[in-house]
Amino acid sequence: MNAPAPRRNARLLVGVDGGGSGCRARIEDAEGGVLGTGIAGPAAVRLGIDRSLAAVESACRAAAAEAGLHPAALAEMDAGVGLAGIGRKGVIGEIMARPHPFRSVIYVNDANIACIGAHGGRDGGIVILGTGSAGFAIV
């Protein structure tokens, strides 16, 4: 991918889909232009929170590299991270207590982020069939 170089001081965002089969990250500028993508191993929290967060960071670093950015650039990005299994009892509190490499981060379940991505933030629904299964709609 030959992504355009981001403008100096441009607001960059990173979105992450962390599932049981793999983890994907995408860095975009404020206008929605894709600058870089990255992939890593599974990020479902059932595999352990340390492993899950390591996959998230690995995918984000790969996306930064593809965008021509230093990994430290993640510290200037706001992140939306969807993780499979985050709804398990006590998981969100434990994840929120962990350090992260971003300016800010919000964690949601992977079905939520998949639905937002599939429908560009508009109303819609999705069905996930893979390592796990889920149905989710936003209206």
Image (spheres, rainbow, N blue to C red):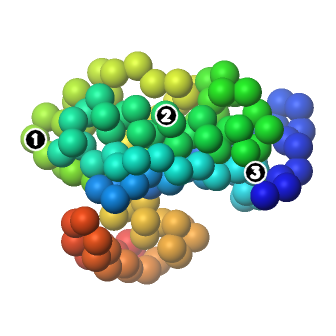
Identify which residue is drawn at 88% across, 32% down: 8
Q: Position of residue 42 (x, y in %)?
A: 35, 49
Q: Element under label 3? A: strand
Residue corresponding to mark 3: 35
- Residue 41 or 124: which is nearer the viewer? 41
User: Mark 1 against mark 3, which lies toward the viewer?
Assistant: 3
Q: Element under label 2? A: helix
Position of residue 116 in the picture relative to residue 7 (left or right): left
Asked if residue 75 is positioned above or below residue 137 in the image, the reply reads above
User: Mark 1 against mark 2, which lies toward the viewer?
Assistant: 2
Q: Badges 3 and 2: C-beta atoms under 8 Å apart?
A: no
Position of residue 65 in the picture relative to residue 38 (left or right): right
Q: Amino acid at mark 2?
A: Glu
N-term mark: 3 or 2: 3
Residue corresponding to mark 2: 57
Identify which residue is drawn at 45% across, 24% down: 100
Asked if residue 20 is positioned above or below residue 126 in the image, the reply reads above
Q: Amino acid at mark 3?
A: Leu
Asked if residue 123 is positioned above or below residue 81 in the image, the reply reads below
Q: Amino acid at mark 1?
A: Lys
N-term mark: 1 or 3: 3
Residue 89 shows which numbered tag? 1
Q: Residues within 10 Å of mark 2 (few under 14, many from 20)?
A: many
Q: Residue furthest left?
A: 89
Q: Element under label 1? A: loop
Position of residue 81 in the picture relative to residue 65 (left or right): left
Q: Position of residue 139 (x, y in %)?
A: 39, 76
